[in-house]
Amino acid sequence: MMLKAENLTKSFKNGKKEHIVLNSINFEVKEGEIFSILGSNGAGKTTLIKLMTKLLNPNNGNIYYNGKNIAKIGEKYYKEIGCVLEGNRNTYWFLSALENIFYFGRLYGLKDGYIKKKGYELLEFFEIIDDKDKKVGQFSLGMQQKLSIIISLIHQPKILFLDEPTLGLDVVSKLDIIDKLKQLSKNEGVTIILTSHQMDVIEKTADRVLLLKDSKIHFLDTIDKLKSMYSKNKYLLKIEGDFTKKQIDKYFDGLTLGNHTRNESYTEIEFYTDYCTMQQDFLKSMINDGIKITEFVKIETDLEEIIYMFLKNQGDGQNI
């Protein structure tokens, strides 16, 4: 395994109280995979990134890179990783893109000839080569983020850490960065560890997801596995005319309800059930009572909804 966390614990003091952010978590990251860390605000995603990049030290536990404890590797570890934290001030706006690349490349101890060659290669790859001499302050948010990733890759790291890499970007910029990350992972073998609140980004990129809640890991596997475990059969029922709350309580008793819309012309109700017989029984009951059903369709549960339901309902603190 490229990266391994063992019994990792991190807490912060809040006055006299100790706030545990991560509590004895264990996981492994495979070489060349895109590994996504999910969780609600305050779940410990950014803290975990900072622990893995040695920006924070754990209270307990260890992180291993290729079998070696990163606490003992020293500065050499930084040559193996690249990192872009959340926010757009990861570069100097008064410098051009190329000047930024040279500045940070020299901090890594790289030779100018190599920086120029690799820098041009990455500028070409991220499709901002024509703007290399433009001041970064004139860049769009998407271009600034691309440049930040370029700088984090200039020394050819084995692992790239990205904290909310597409936050605030327009659709085109977001999809472009998603495509580039997938190419880096697949074609260059770069291991990418990222956090994001945007489920479409996770769904399009992640090989595996780690889900944090209440300082513990509640899920660690593929998105397909997550969907198969927590996706419920979701249906939309459209009924002619207004449907009273009393009627909803009568016919949908025992079912989990989603969104529902009521007006004088029609009523739309979303509900969840895993039992076909239950669907048949209450639909027959409605029809027998003279209720006109105009539409009944199955809706695929998207990842965002699954994560929402998971975070809302999982509270036992048990690892999965």
Image (cartoon, grey):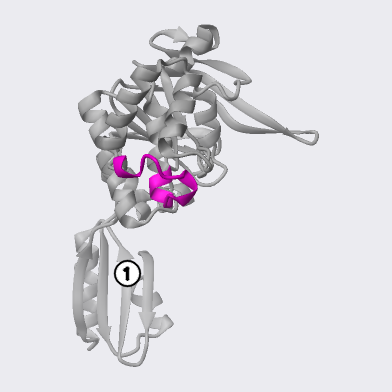
What is the quadrant of the N terminus in the image?
Answer: top left
- Residue 192 located left or right of residue 283: right
Q: Left of 106 or right of it: where is 239?
A: left
Give the side of residue 300 with respect to residue 67, left or right. Answer: left
* Amino acid type at mark 1: Glu
- Quarter holding residue 252: bottom left
Q: Is residue 60 above or below residue 170?
A: above
Is disc 1 surrounded by few (<14), some (14 to 19) or many (20+) residues within 10 Å?
some
* x and y, in percent, of residue 303 in the image: 32, 51
Magenta stretch, main secondary structure, is helix
Quadrant showing the C terminus = top left
Toward the bottom, the furthest residue is: 264
Secondary element type, mark 1: strand
Rendered image quadrant of residue 29: top left
Q: Is residue 157 visible?
A: no
Residue where numbered disc 1 is placed: 270
Q: Tell me the residue at 54%/28% (across/down).
A: 50
Q: Is residue 97 visible?
A: yes
203 in the magenta segment: no
Identify the residue at image location x=54%, y=7%: 72
Rendering coords of residue 318 (x, y %)? 47, 33
Where residue 164 appears, x then y in whole percent?
A: 45, 43
Residue 27: where, in percent of width, then height?
A: 41, 23
- Relative to 266, residue 139 above or below: above
Residue drawn at the location 25% of the way across and 66% of the way down: 235
Depicted 117 relative to depicted 18: above or below: above
Region of the chain picked out in magenta, as a range: 129-144
Q: Is residue 138 magenta?
A: yes
Front residue of this view, candidates 67 and 169: 169
